[in-house]
Image (tube, grey):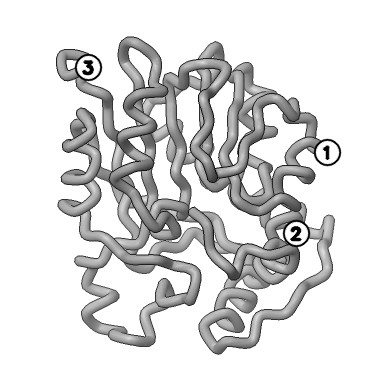
Amino acid sequence: MRCEAYGGDYPAARGHHDPEVGRCKVQTLERWLERLGLNVAGQTVCEIGFGGAACLAALQERGATVLGLEPVAANRVHAEELGIPRAHLFDSEPLPRLPRKPTLWLLQDSFEHIPDPNSLVRWMAAESAATGARALVVAPDAGSPSRALMGRFWIHNVPDHQVHYSRAGVASIFSRAGFRVLQAFYPLKRVSLAMVWRHLRLLAGAPTPVRSSDRASPSIWFNIGEMGLLLERDDRRR
């Protein structure tokens, strides 16, 4: 998940530490977990590319043991400030030996940032709990109608996305590592108007750091061209 763009200004340009962004991300994840019938209490959850770590903090409050991989050092520091133990936070290179085996993996808009997804997913399979490990993946869908309609103006065409996959492409990568698709779903996201404006600036090549705010701005439930997959490690293939 390494990229020259992941410097100290990366979180500010994307509002990773903005409480408003964090609230929207937590509301979004809660919606997905409820829809999929996933209860995190007592689970070991590892999020790959956790950004501002708001979801890690929320999962920990709900009784999960949380682990996180994140290439941006400032985001790992921020996660500690939110109460995540330092021993549970890791850089993405080299891939670490985890202190606990995850029962649930989260990749929320991070899979498209990964330069070698096959290696990552093989590592996930090796580090997973002995039985019943699952992975929740939300990512831009290269096969979506919105991409065909918008072409190079597709909202997911930003510089730090390594590649965009179709649903079948993601399933194939995970299948080679011993995961199978349990469920596909349409992942609506809670998005504030400030987040939309920030993303439009990124598309225009003019990202600017924004001030964090504890005040909520108007928000909507939104999806243009993203897919959601819940996968499970096939224990027979271990």
Lower sequence index among marks 3 and 2: 2
Q: Residue 7 bears which disc, if any? A: none
Q: Amino acid at mark 3?
A: Arg
Q: What residue occupies the far front of the structure in this picture? A: 94
Task: Relative to 201, say whether 1 is above or below.
Answer: above
Left or right, 39 with respect to 120, comes to: right
Q: Residue at x 16, y 52 (%)?
A: 168
Task: Relative to 37, say whether 118 is above or below.
Answer: below
Q: CA distance from mark 1 to mark 2?
A: 22 Å
Q: CA distance from mark 3 to mark 2?
A: 46 Å
> Which residue was labeled with disc 2?
216
Lower sequence index among marks 1 and 2: 1
Task: Relative to 78, say whether 109 is above or below.
Answer: below
Q: Secondary structure at mark 2?
A: loop
Q: Secondary structure at mark 3?
A: loop
Residue 182 makes an appearance in the image:
no
Q: Nearer the viewer, residue 25 or 219?
A: 25
Q: Secondary structure at mark 1?
A: helix
Q: Position of residue 176 (x, y in %)?
A: 17, 37
Residue 238: image quadrant is top left
> Which residue was labeled with disc 1?
81
Q: Residue 238 bears which disc, if any? A: 3
Circle 2 residues within 10 Å: few <14, some 14–19, many ≥20: some
Q: Amino acid at mark 2?
A: Ala
Q: Residue at x 38, y 86 (%)?
A: 153
Q: Nearer the viewer, residue 217 or 103?
A: 103
Query: Mark 3, mark 2: which one is toward the viewer?
Result: 3
Query: Mark 1, mark 2: which one is toward the viewer?
Result: 1
Left or right, 145 with respect to 58, comes to: left
Circle 1 residues within 10 Å: few <14, some 14–19, many ≥20: few
